Amino acid sequence: MSVGEEVGTEQTRQQQSLGTAAARNLATTTKSVPQMQEISSRWLLRMLPWVDVQGGTYRVNRRLTYAVGDGRMTFVKTGDRVEVIPAELGELPALRSYDDTEVLSELAARCRQREVGAGQVIASFGSPADEVYLLAHGRVEKVGTGPYGEDESLGVLADGAYFGDQVLLDEEAIWEYTARTLTACTVLALPREAFAQVAERSESLREHLRGIRTIPGQRTNRYGEKEIDLAAGHSGEPDIPHTFVDYEAKPREYELSVAQTVLRIHTRVADLYNQPMNQTEQQVRLTVEALKERQEHELVNNRDFGLLHNCEYDQRIQPHAGVPSPDDMDELLSRRRGTRLLLAHPRAIAAFGRELNKRGLVPETIDMGGNRIPTWRGVPIFPCNKIPVTEARTTSIIALRTGQEEQGVIGLRATGIPDEIEPSLSVRFMGINEQAIIKYLVTAYYSAAVLVPDALGVLENVEIGRWR
């Protein structure tokens, strides 16, 4: 190519119109509002019936119930050694309300640690019972004999449970079921002989045991509530029983919890950069979204009022095969009347779906605000990513009966608070400091109450990582 041809080609390459980069300087861009990945569906906040609380406290009055000592044990692990916390032995029915720390410490020291492999029998049906077993880790199935002679599962025990406690009061006790491990287990065994030796040297323990044996049995219903004496099917003129309904002397009170933050915005930003979007409004909107996410997290996980920590132990069940099977879900639903909703981590819902696929089952779905929600036995299963997943890839599934009229689970809030922008949520102006920064106090008040124990149930230790 000649020199003249090169010059001509260069001239044709020169820009002939306004470029897009320069044109953008005169254009108004179309913008979205600030986006936020943390926002979730928050089905619990949407489905929970909310009750307005005056005075910041909600008292749950219940019929008098007699405790039977069916709690769980807490253990301390040092290396490969496991020990029960002495005070936790008070969960055993025979030691309930007994508070001599020296004696409890000696009993705890008498517990012997055992490692039991999967599939092993810890206790056999019909054999003499001479030890109390405290389950520190693992899962144990209680197997009985059905009406036709076949094996029948009586339930699955998990970390913190105990069995065989009848040996402490009955020297001739026998095992009424077979205890068989489903996984490798760590158990602590307290021999009856060791318990008797400690009782022989402790006057306070002997007095406690004598008091238990001499207290007349209180007539209760199957829920542990004081029986209401009634007469039915009689004729003539018999004496009609007299009765009354007793209440708990110290009912539980739920105080509203709080989530707060101080939002700071510079006056220069609020004054000069408010078009086309109001900076203060967007800052408040995103802060409120984060506050609601924390609110739902607390409703699930808070140790005082959270659902996972307020479920009674007799309303907690273990999956028989580890994975969330349809049979386990049926067992969970059967523990209460009128279950309104199930909450599960999205990965638990996927694990349940795999089990349905294996059996060739297709769950029904319902429409909830334009979302297709899977159901089981007509009960919707809502995703909730606030339910924790452990390092062992296990999680929980929560079942709820809701509403005051149904004696269920309710949310608590306080409406009508100053500077309220939503029920029980306020944004209050706190002034401007010397650095020209505006401050707003963003506050949410909330809690949750379980009106009767069977309104809330949990399927625990659900495996979500098994694919076969």
Image: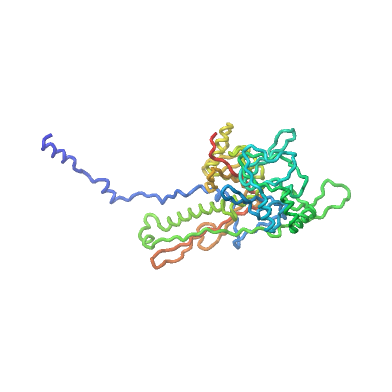
Residue nearer the viewer, 348 or 106: 106
Left or right of 273 in this view: 96:
right
Q: What quarter of the picture does the N terminus occupy?
A: top left
In this picture, is 298 found above or below 2? below
- The percent coordinates of residue 20 (x first, y second) are 27, 46
**Residue at point 82%, 55% (across, down):** 242
Direction bottom: furthest residue: 434
User: Residue sitting at 53 percent across and 51 percent down?
Assistant: 297
The picture quadrant where one finds residue 274 is: bottom left
How many marks the image carries: the answer is 0
Q: Work out whether residue 37 can be spotted.
A: yes
Q: Percent x, y for residue 286?
A: 45, 54
Out of 41 and 76, give the one closest to the viewer.
76
Identity of the residue drawn at 53% across and 45% down: 391
Q: Residue furthest top?
A: 360
Residue drawn at the location 77% of the way across and 48% of the way down: 170
> In the picture, residue 318 is in which quadrant?
top right
What is the quadrant of the C terminus in the image? top right
Indicate whether 124 appears above or below 279.
Answer: above
Direction from residue 465 to residue 172 in the image, left or right = right
* Residue 131 horizontal/vertical position (percent): 71, 46
Residue closest to the eye, 73 or 24: 73
Image quarter of residue 106: bottom right
- Evaluate whether residue 425 shows in this view: no
In the rendered image, residue 134, in percent from the top left (x then y), is placed at 66, 47
Query: What colour scheme has been applied to the protein in the rendered image?
Result: rainbow
